[in-house]
Amino acid sequence: MIRRCDPRDFESIWVIINDGAQAYKGIIPADRWTEPYMSREKLQHEIDDGVVFWGYEDSGSLVAVMGIQPVQDVTLVRHAYVRTTSQKKGLGALLLSHLRNMTNNPVLIGTWADAAWAIRFYERYGFQVVTPDEKQRLLKKYWTVPERQIETSVVLADPMWREQRSLIVP
């Protein structure tokens, strides 16, 4: 079952993010890795900044989470994680589809450039990596991330963003 997370889910969200993020250990640059991957304070900051988490619940427990954040004229998908014991079951795809259906805005997703599996996942659902110049512009316009994260990340855009972009750029 997919449901909106509430404050009672905070600890579960934090555990799922840090469990799922283990896949990045040794893949992303060492200077971007922390233990835990996301602190409770950082998670609270993200929620305070407008990230709304949705989760997939199985037998009364959250096993996957994905955040959505409207920013200006786009919607960002943020912090998409599945517990390692529940991966490869289509839960990320279910959450992504649910969140995409919640917005009429173009959807953008940022992830680590070296996380090839994450990029392939989003590409299977119609997202495409934007050019390096566009990535720079988008990360600075819609996200608040350090310069080093901008250097080591990619942005993927959905077809709606690309269609709107083609109407603007000659």
Image: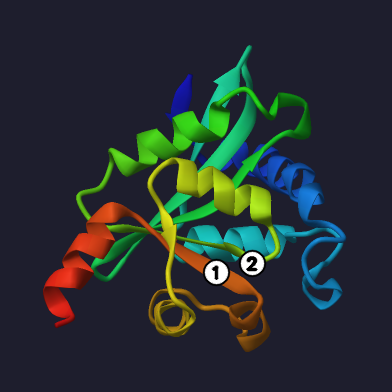
- The local crowd at label 1, few if under 14, some if 14 to 19, many if 20 or more residues have their Cα within 10 Å, is many
- Mark yes or no: residue 53 visible: no
| Left or right, residue 77 beside residue 119 | left
**Dot 2: element:** loop
| Left or right, residue 67 beside residue 79 | left
In this figure, which residue is indicated by the disc labeled 1?
Answer: 154
Q: What sort of colour scheme is used for the picture?
A: rainbow
* Marks 1 and 2 close (CB-CB < 8 Å): yes
* Residue 153 vertical position relative to residue 84 in the rendered view, above or below: below
* Residue 133 vertical position relative to residue 98 in the rendered view, above or below: below
Q: Find the residue positioned furthest to the top.
A: 59
| Left or right, residue 80 beside residue 30 | left
Which numbered disc flags the more N-terminal residue, 1 or 2?
Answer: 2
What is the quadrant of residue 61 in the picture?
top right
The kind of residue on which mark 1 rests is: Val
- List x then y, in percent, for residue 52: 44, 49
What is the quadrant of residue 15 in the picture?
top right
